[in-house]
Amino acid sequence: MTTVAIAPRMRKGLRTIILYVILLGITSLLLFPLMWLVSTSLKDIGKEFSLPIQLVPSPPIWTNYALVFERATFGVFVRNSFLVTILSVTGSVLSCSLVGFSFARLRYPGRDLLFGLVLSTMMLPAVIQLIPQFIVFNRVGWINTFLPLVVPSWFCQANYGQGAFYIFLMRQFFRTIPIEFDEAARVDGASTLQIFWHVVLPQAIPPLTAVGIFAFLSNWSDFLYPLVFLQKLNLQTVALGIRLFHTTGGGLEQIPFRLMAAASFMALIPPVIVLLVGQRYFVRGVTLSGLAGR
């Protein structure tokens, strides 16, 4: 009787062990590029591609990270990226939440049609918008400034058409909040903007966090838009600055891969921190759990 009862437990425990081993193997496989990046950033010159692969350099060359700032104005690139990203994230969160509130809580003619048109913009490839955007920004004198990268986000025009997705995310969450909250606030004399700011928005921390994380990752790692609108070296972002380590002419042996790896790893740190800090609210915001997700 005891042996029969123990057998299912042993099989369940064995399945659990096998599952964890498989997951550990998959995780190691996915993390290998990151481990190789860190390892390369700590290797001495000429040893980046030495065989056999040495994941733990001996000795580690920590000065490679200092050389990144000496070889290029990497500190300026980081500052520019933070400036563009923070301003763009703030604009996306505020403008898209306001538009999402309009589609979710207000009643006016053509509301659903307008929402459908907004969603249809997600089908447009972002690349085809670059030429008209460049012409417009060039005529108003915004080339070689941060304005083309920041101002559109304050009008729900995030890069690569993500503004429509942010609006959709906010609208779906706002629809889960009981409309009785708005009615009670109106009885107390609150205006529409006051209802948005004091009643609805404080309950929308999860989708606001999700939109903020999406916008941060998109703007921090963006390469195409800064490449098009920023030609001056002192205005370039981290994504553009890393390519400066790729010297022109010669062969691969002239490219300081260890410095490129060090710069790339440092560029990964802010997005990872943002994801770790906002992970809990990010998951709840994406799953659109409504009031239960607070």
Image (cartoon, rainbow, N blue to C red):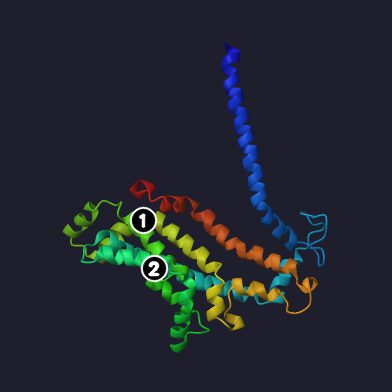
Q: Secondary structure at mark 2?
A: helix
Q: Is 163 in front, or is 177?
A: 163
Label 1's element? loop
Which image quarter holds the N terminus? top right
What residue did someone put label 2 on?
121
Give residue 154's quadrant in the image: bottom left
- Three-letter code, disc 1: Ala
**Residue 197 vs residue 238: left or right?**
left
Is residue 229 shown above or below 287? below
Residue at 57% x, 77% y: name it: 227
Q: Position of residue 25 (x, y in %)?
A: 66, 43
List x then y, in percent, for residue 231: 58, 83
Circle 1 sits on which residue? 204
As drawn, the residue found furthest toward the top would be 1
Residue at 66% across, 63% down: 265
Front-most of residues 120 and 184: 120
Nearer to us of marks 1 and 2 is 2
Disc on the earlier residue, 1 or 2: 2
- Going by the numbered disc 2, the residue's amino acid type is Thr
State how many labels appear. 2
